Image (tube, grey):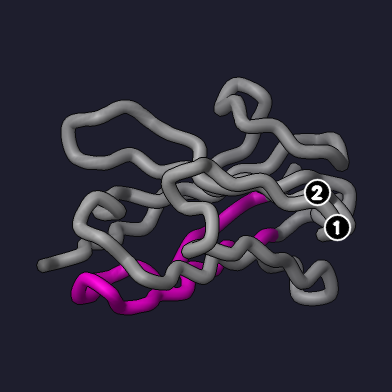
Amino acid sequence: QVQLVESGGGPVQAGGSLRLSCAASGRFFSATAMGWFRQPPGKELEFVAAISDNGRISDYADSVKGRFTISRDNAKNTVYLEMNSLRPEDTAVYYCASRPVGFNSILPAAYDVWGQGTQVTVSS
């Protein structure tokens, strides 16, 4: 069973950058696809990015494409979300999640393990 802990969130000014990390424990991290989701205040959970088990395939929501980069380091059991050119509408609680297959999904229901979330607040 994979366990996930997010870190790296906090306040940031519009136009700035932030790097989120998701540390995983568990034997089969390298066999899992990983995703980032977020929940803005008063809104529903939304897909942000996903990465395949070997890191070769990445998917992004249109709202973050070209600004965010997902990556993973399987040797460190960690997935990252590099966020650049941040906007106030990026303000949300960010969650990482895993699913027990190697390929990506944009659907929250496809993921079976979730982290506790980390708050990102972008001020203008």
* 101 vs 7: above or below: above
Mark 2 surroundings within 10 Å by alpha-carbon count, few (fewer than 14), some (14 through 19), many (20 or more):
many
The N terminus is located in which quarter? top right
Query: Residue shown at 48%/64% (left/top)?
Result: 67
Q: Position of residue 69 (x, y in %)?
A: 59, 64
Name the quadrant containing residue 44.
Answer: top left
Q: Secondary structure at mark 1?
A: loop
Determine whether the residue tagged by mark 2 lies in a helix, strand or loop.
loop
Which residue sits furthest left?
124
Residue 96 counted in the magenta span: no
Image quadrant in which you'd find residue 107? top right
Rendered residue at 46%/52% (across/down): 64
Above or below residue 17? Residue 108 is above
Q: Camera-side residue: 17 or 19? A: 17
The kind of residue on which mark 1 rests is Arg
**Observer able to see residue 52:** yes
* Residue sitting at x 84%, y 74%: 75
> Taking 33 as reference, is 37 left or right?
left
Q: Main secondary structure of the magenta part?
A: strand
What is the magenta range?
3-24
Label 2 to label 1, Cα distance in Å?
6 Å
Image spot of residue 29 (x, y percent): 80, 54
Task: Identify residue type, mark 2.
Answer: Ser
- Residue at (23%, 74%) from the top-left corner? 12
x and y percentages locating residue 109 in the rendered image:
60, 21
Residue 23 showing in the rendered view? no
- Circle 2 sits on which residue? 52
In the figure, is residue 74 to the left or right of 89?
A: right
Q: Residues within 10 Å of mark 1 (few under 14, many from 20)?
A: few
Q: Disc 2, disc 1: CB below 8 Å?
A: yes
The residue to which callout 1 is attached is: 56
Q: Quadrant of the C terminus?
A: bottom left
